[in-house]
Image: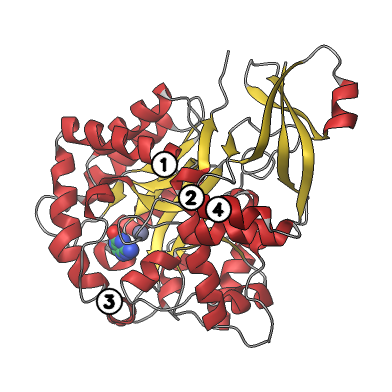
């Protein structure tokens, strides 16, 4: 048992913040040897319950749950900031050429290490992650994640049409490769598999049908794709699938909407789409830096809340412009302002934070496992230094309450805030 004394940020079951200025986080192994939160709360109360625990004191620091990135592409690490007119030319000119290099296992392994270094420096401890269509890329990703004992989710991209040589896969083979990867990696240590059709326009009906069959056969795997990001993409999908009610409905028709299905973007939706999300337990990965960078549009937070479906925040690197959750939360705030119909602040800072931690975990079906520091959660946590820069030191000292403190961190923060990222160890 080990205890850490500092300020402590957690969330209650309703997603509201719980903050102890002088807090104590007690970590210890469960029956399998996995490090979990054993107790958390105000120092005086919690310390009294654990008289024997060794205490590390981090004065002036904030302990917070590791961030959860609901949608990111590890093979796009090197194409952050690639300029394009919009999604489709960006894919053709930058993304597919960069991804074709992941046929090489050595390149896949090298980029996976850079990717994990970058995630951890930025305080992201779990991500739902696109690999490429090459099984080697998934293999490299999971091997590196396993060595670091991370909770990570990924999968081989399925794209058997409208894709250039070098990234296009073959229908039958893509499905047998997917099943082999599920059997090798899903639920091994803290790793999880996501069945990953790139998006409907780049898969044949046969491939989407096969993906849906695998999703039914392995019901606790994830499903991960893109939908309704860009107007040209929506038009293309409507032409390719004229019988579906909407672009989103294409996925429903192939059995690709259920709990643990996550769709990035979800911008060009109507209320029937939102109800379909809610009724199937499907979640959105909201990626505002990407949507602003590629000129895709603005996620409708009010619409999502009005209908009541699950969503969380995501970087979407390399369409997104930063690995930093602070950049993503700030962009979400701006986008929330854009769609705002009522006066007042846009999304409250603590809600932005929850959408990138506990709320994202809930949207992934990992509530109570990651994204929070309540007892029972795996011990993936951050030590945040709110005085990491001169301006942050000045500004955070002026905060009158928790919302002001969190907002200062979101607006001014970057990887310098993350003094330490602690990963739950096993055994
Ligand atoms: N739609 C299909 N593929 C992609 C991708 O790689 N990035 C984004 N942002 N959208 C996509
Ligand atoms: Zn994406």
Judged left or right of residue 14, residue 248 is: left
Q: Nearer the viewer, residue 136 or 267?
A: 267
Q: Earlier in the sequence, mark 4 or mark 3?
A: 3
Give the spatial CA distance, label 4 vs label 3: 50 Å
Give the spatial CA distance, label 3 vs label 2: 31 Å
Q: Which residue is mark 3?
A: 240
**Image marks 2 and 1: residues in contact by CB distance under 8 Å:** yes
Q: Which residue is mark 2?
A: 69
Query: Could you say where residue 126 lies in the image, as x and y percent from the top left?
Result: 50, 41
Per the image, label 2 sits on a secondary structure element best described as strand
- Give the mark toward the camera: 3 or 2: 2
Q: Earlier in the sequence, mark 4 or mark 2?
A: 2
Give the spatial CA distance, label 3 vs label 1: 36 Å
Q: Nearer the viewer, residue 348 or 91?
A: 348
Q: Earlier in the sequence, mark 2 or mark 1?
A: 2
- Give the mark toward the camera: 2 or 1: 1
Q: Which residue is mark 1?
A: 119
- Give the mark toward the camera: 4 or 3: 4
Query: Could you say where residue 323 lies in the image, as x and y percent from the top left?
Result: 40, 50
Give the spatial CA distance, label 1 vs label 4: 22 Å
Give the spatial CA distance, label 2 vs label 1: 9 Å
Q: Which residue is mark 4?
A: 392
């Amino acid at each position: 048992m080990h205890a850490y004394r500092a300020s402590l940020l957690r969330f209650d079951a309703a997603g509201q913040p719980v903050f102890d200025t002088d807090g104590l986080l007690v970590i210890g192994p469960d029956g399998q040897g996995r490090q979990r939160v054993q107790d958390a709360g105000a120092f005086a109360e919690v310390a009294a319950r654990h008289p024997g625990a060794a205490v590390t004191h981090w004065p002036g620091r904030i302990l917070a749950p590791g961030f959860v990135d609901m949608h990111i592409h590890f093979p796009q690490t090197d194409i952050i900031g690639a300029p394009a007119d919009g999604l489709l030319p960006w894919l053709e000119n930058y993304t597919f050429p960069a991804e074709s290099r992941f046929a090489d296992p050595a390149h896949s392994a090298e980029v996976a290490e850079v990717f994990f270094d970058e995630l951890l420096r930025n305080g992201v401890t779990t991500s739902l992650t696109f690999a490429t269509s090459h099984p080697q890329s998934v293999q490299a990703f999971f091997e590196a994640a396993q060595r670091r004992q991370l909770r990570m989710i990924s999968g081989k991209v399925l794209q058997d049409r409208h894709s250039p040589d070098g990234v296009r896969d073959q229908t039958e083979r893509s499905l047998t490769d997917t099943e082999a990867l599920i059997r090798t990696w899903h639920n091994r240590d803290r790793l999880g598999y996501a069945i990953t059709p790139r998006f409907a326009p780049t898969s044949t009906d046969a491939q989407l049908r096969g993906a849906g069959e695998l999703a039914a056969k392995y019901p606790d795997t994830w499903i991960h794709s893109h939908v309704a990001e860009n107007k040209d993409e929506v038009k293309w999908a409507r032409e390719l699938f004229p019988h579906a009610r909407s672009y989103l409905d294409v996925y429903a028709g192939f059995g690709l909407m259920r709990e643990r299905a996550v769709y990035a973007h979800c911008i060009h939706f109507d209320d029937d789409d939102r109800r379909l999300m809610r009724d199937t337990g499907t979640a959105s990965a909201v990626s505002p830096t990407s949507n602003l960078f590629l000129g895709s549009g603005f996620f409708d937070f009010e619409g999502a809340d009005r209908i009541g479906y699950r969503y969380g925040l995501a970087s979407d690197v390399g369409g997104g412009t930063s690995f930093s959750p602070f950049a993503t939360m700030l962009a979400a705030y701006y986008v929330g302002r854009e769609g705002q119909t009522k006066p007042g602040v846009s999304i409250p800072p603590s809600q932005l934070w929850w959408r990138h931690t506990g709320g994202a975990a809930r949207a992934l079906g990992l509530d109570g496992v990651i994204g929070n520091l309540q007892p029972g959660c795996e011990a993936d946590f951050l030590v945040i230094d709110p005085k990491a820069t001169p301006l942050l030191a000045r500004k955070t000292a002026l905060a009158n309450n928790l919302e002001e403190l969190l907002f200062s961190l979101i607006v001014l923060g970057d990887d310098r805030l993350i003094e330490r990222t602690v990963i739950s160890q096993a055994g």
